[in-house]
Image (tube, rainbow, N blue to C red):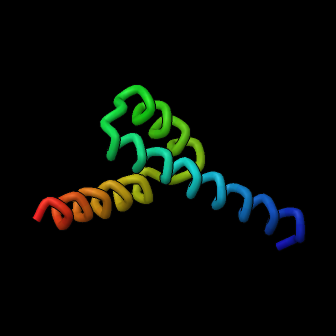
Amino acid sequence: MTGHGIHEKRDKHEEGMDVALALIQSLVIGDDVAKIAAYRRLQHVWTQKEIDDLTIDVEALFRAYAG
C-alpha cells in the first residue's frame, strides 16, 4: 500500500469515528433530525455490517445504563 493509500484509509477511519460519535450523541439526546443526518453520513464511510455492529453495541450500552 502506498503512503497516499494509508492516509486515505486513516482519514476515512477518523471520519467514520467522528460520524459514529455524532450518531450516538443524537441517540442520547433524542434528536431525530441529527440521527438521520449522521446515519446517512455514516453510510458513506462504513459498511452496513459495521453500522449494524455499532447499533448492537449502543443498544447494549443503553440497556446496561437503564439497569
Residue 51 locus on image (x, y percent): 41, 53
Q: Residue at x 32, y 54 (%)?
A: 55
- Furthest toward the right, the residue is 3
Q: In this rendering, is residue 63 above or below 39?
A: below
Q: Quadrant of the C terminus?
A: bottom left
Q: Is residue 38 left or right of residue 65?
A: right
Q: In this rendering, is residue 60 above or below 27?
A: below
The part of the image, by quadrant, that contains residue 8 is: bottom right
Of residues 57 and 5, the one drawn nearer to the viewer in this rendering:
57
Q: Residue at x 40, y 40 (%)?
A: 26
The part of the image, by quadrant, that contains residue 3 is: bottom right
- Furthest toward the top, the residue is 33
Q: In this rendering, is residue 24 above or below 5?
A: above
Q: How many numbered discs, if any?
A: 0
Q: Is residue 20 left or right of residue 29?
A: right
Residue 7 locus on image (x, y percent): 81, 64
Of residues 54 and 5, the one drawn nearer to the viewer in this rendering:
54
Of residues 23 and 16, the one drawn nearer to the viewer in this rendering:
23
Q: Residue at x 65, y 59 (%)?
A: 14
